[in-house]
Amino acid sequence: MKGYSTENQAAFLYSRGRFLSHRVSLLLFLLILSVPFNGGRVLYGIPPRIGIVAGESALQTSEAWSALVSFVEERFGILFRYEVFDGHRSLLKALKERWIDLGCIDVAWYVREQGWIRPLLRTEVRGQTAYRVVLIVQRNSIFYRTSDLRGFELYLKPPFEEMAGFYAPLAFLSSYLPVPIGSIRFLDTYESILKGVAYGKGMEVGAIPEYLWIQYRGSRVLESLRVLDTLPWIPTPVIVMRTSDEEARFTELIRILSTLSTMEQGKQILEGISCSGFTTDRIPNEAIMALSEQIQKVDMYYGPPK
């Protein structure tokens, strides 16, 4: 370079290299910041992964969440992923080991594990963030009050999937009379519970969510059934995150999921996952304390689910 000494040339090239390096770093930083505003991206550019318990059908659960993921990506340009688990234990293990970022879990599991997780969203079922369990008996059953129950057989869903629905009936019934472990039968689906009670010997008692009883109204199987008792309200499942993580990473996803119930197509997508919407409302402390008492009471008599 004319008019410059060798030392000056070297200093000039060094300073120019540093300037270009800073420009590249600044450009990369701005690209990272722009990630939330670009289609198909979320904060930090890594799509969060949500864990879901399979429920009555792993295939149907996967198909329903696949439709939800596709709709959110097409409508809002936001990417997230899901993974289906066979139970809450494997889901929470994956969350703790950071294989997934969020988990949609039964509220009883949140009560058990709230030391290291916190809720981000609550699910709504038929517009409610809580549901009730009803005890059903055969229409011709000799049982007309809960206190009448003697020598009966109790039908429940497996405790791994319906935790609150498992604890609430046992805690409620044990306040009237002990329920022998040998009298508890776990049936895979709510439909099998309905049919098991309707076409049994008349000594069976089933526990199902009240909203499913309403949903089945008009069906032939309900003609042979009646409600024996209705239990207190239970919070619906929640989407949780690790307390050690930054909530900011999920802010946009939370906002999008919270608005789905306001769109016609969004409502149809939500129906597939047996949900009418998501809300950021907090779980009342009294509901958490009541469920905690139910869990402790049942575990005292029957032990925790294995």
Image (cartoon, grey):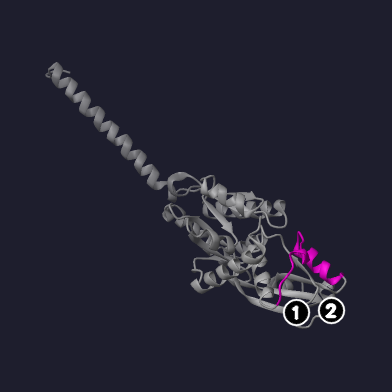
> For numbered disc 2, what is the local secondary structure?
loop
Pointer 1 residue: 228
Picture coordinates of residue 96 (x, y %)?
A: 52, 49
The residue drawn where x is 75% and y is 79% is: 228
Single out the residue that lies furthest toward the bottom.
144
Give the labeled residue for mark 2. 141
Q: Position of residue 305 (x, y in %)?
A: 65, 58
Q: Position of residue 265 (x, y in %)?
A: 62, 62
- The quadrant of the picture occupied by the C terminus is bottom right
Q: Amino acid at mark 2?
A: Ser
CA separation in Å, label 1 and label 2: 10 Å
The residue under the point 67% across, 54% down is 54
In which image quadrant can residue 132 be found? bottom right
Q: The disc labelled 1 sits on which kind of residue?
A: Leu
Q: Range of the magenta residues? A: 177-200
Residue 52 visible in the snapshot: yes
Please name whichever residue, 258 or 88, is drawn nearer the observer in this view of the structure.
Answer: 88
Instruction: Residue 152: name its quadrant.
Output: bottom right
Decide if residue 243 is on the left or right side of residue 91.
Answer: left
